[in-house]
Amino acid sequence: MPERLITIGDIHGCLAALNTLLDIIKPEVDDTIVTLGDYIDRGPDSRGVIDRMIELQSMCRLVPLLGNHDEVLIDIRNGKEDLFADWLLFGGNTTLMSYSTLRPDAIPEEHVNFLRNCRLYYETDRYIFLHGTYDPALPLESQSRRTLLWDKLRPAPPGPHFSGKTVIVGHTAQRSGQILDLGYLKCIDTCCYGEGWLTAMELPSGKIWQVDKEGRMKDKL
C-alpha cells in the first residue's frame, strides 16, 4: 500500500471514536497521520486517548499538534495554578475523572510530556496543518501562539494563506457535523464530544471517515 497522509480533528477524550477510526484506517509504518490537537477535556476518556496516541507513535509517522486545551494543562503543570479553576469549567473536570484523581500533578509525566512535545503547526509542500487559525500574510514561524492555538474562524475566516497552500484546522467546532470546506481552508473539528463526529481526512484524495463518540461510523448508524 502506498504511503498515505491522513489528518484527524479534535478528539477531546473520545476514545471509542478514535479507536474505531484507527481500526478503519489501519495505519501503516509509512503513513503520516497529523492530529490537530485537543486530545483532552470534555469527552469521557482523556487518559485512554493519550495512551492510544503514545501507542500510535510506534505504528506510523505520527505528527501530533498542540491544542489550546492541551496547553492549559501544560501551563498548570508548569506552575500556573491560577488557571486550575477555569480549567475545570473548560472541560478539565472530565480529564481528571479519567485519571481517577482531583489533582493535575497526579497525571503521569509520560502523558504530560506527550503534550509538551506536540508541534504548533506542520507544513508540507501542499498543506498547512494547525489547530486554531492563521494570519494569511505571515509565514508560519511568524504567527503568534495565540493565533495558532486560541483564535477561531469566527466571526469570519481568514483569506487564503500567501503560500497558496491548503490549510487544515480544527478548534472551531462545526456543530452541524459537516466539515467547513472553503477550498483553500478546511476545518475538520466536527464536535465529536457533542452530538457530532470525529473526522479523519485523507489527502489529497479528500476521502472522509466520520465516527460518533460511541464509536459508530456515520454510514452505519
Image (tube, helix red, strand yellow):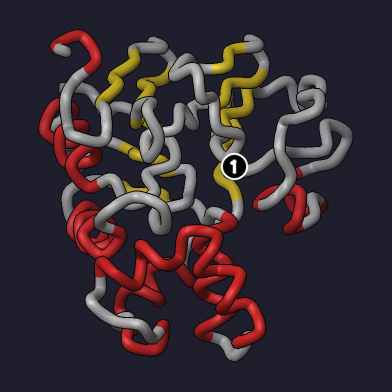
User: Residue 196: which quarter of the image?
Assistant: top left
Whether 81 is drawn above or below 219: the answer is: below
Quarter of the view holding residue 139: top right
- In the image, residue 139 above or below residue 99: above
Tell me the kind of residue under disc 1.
Leu
Q: Residue at x 44, y 15 (%)?
A: 204
Query: Percent from the top left, x then y, of residue 79?
Result: 59, 90
Front residue of 27 and 53: 53
Pinpoint residue 31: horizontal percent, then vertical percent: 27, 36
The C terminus - image quarter: top left
| Within-10-Å neighbours for mark 1: few <14, some 14–19, many 20+ | many
Front residue of this view, candidates 12 and 64: 12
Determine if residue 199 is in view: no
Q: How many marks?
A: 1
Residue at image position (34%, 72%) is: 96
* Residue located at (26% from left, 28% from top): 212
For residue 87, side relative to residue 209 (left or right):
right
Q: Residue shown at 47%/59% (left/top)?
A: 91
Residue at the spot of label 1? 130
Residue 73: tell me if it is visible.
Answer: yes
